[in-house]
Image: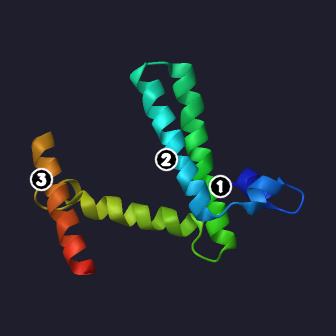
Amino acid sequence: MNLARYLRGPEGCPWDREQTSLTFAKYAIKEGDELVEALERQDNVHSEEEMGDTLFVLLASIAAAESEGRFTLASVLERVHEKMIRRHDHVFGENKAQTPEDAIVAWNRIKEEEKARSK
């Protein structure tokens, strides 16, 4: 994260400074596609590189969001932690999933409930 912040700083890279959280996020899609291709080829060296590229562009997007006053790395991590606990009610709640299919049904039910509440 510090490298992403440095690259956006006054002594960093002019291109990185010009990017926004949105423009970096768009690069994450491209990097994610390259990661999937490398994983499908079972090319571990390239997969590792693409995993790093994907992670770094997401960190750069968060660094940009921080400077835009939108959110922070800490808030992103807190939100995803809460979401994963909530969406894994079949693990952390009373209704335990017995099969992968049960888990998907439970996940999708919770996701739909969340969508309905946010409308």
- Which is more foreground, mark 1 or mark 2? 2
Q: Which residue is drawn at 58% across and 75% down?
A: 70
The residue beneath circle 1 is: 60
Helix, strand or loop under label 1: helix
N-term mark: 1 or 3: 1
- Residue 50 x %, y %: 56, 33
Mark 1 surroundings: few (<14), some (14-19) or many (≥20) residues within 10 A: many
Amino acid marked by disc 2 = Ile
Left or right of 104 on screen, residue 23: right
Q: Nearer the viewer, residue 14 or 70?
A: 14
How far apart in space, not on screen, are marks 1 and 3 (Cα)?
34 Å
Look at the image and tell me in which quarter the N terminus lies. bottom right
Left or right of 20 on screen, residue 103: left
Q: Which residue is drawn at 48% across and 41% down?
A: 32
Q: Is residue 97 visible?
A: no
N-term mark: 3 or 2: 2
N-term mark: 1 or 2: 2
CB contact under 8 Å: marks 1 and 2: no
Amino acid marked by disc 3 = Val
- Which is more foreground, mark 3 or mark 2? 2
Against 6, is 65 above or below?
below
> Could you say which disc has been placed on residue 69 in the image?
none
The residue beneath circle 3 is: 105
Q: Can residue 36 be seen in this view?
A: yes
The residue beneath circle 2 is: 29
Mark 2 surroundings: few (<14), some (14-19) or many (≥20) residues within 10 A: some
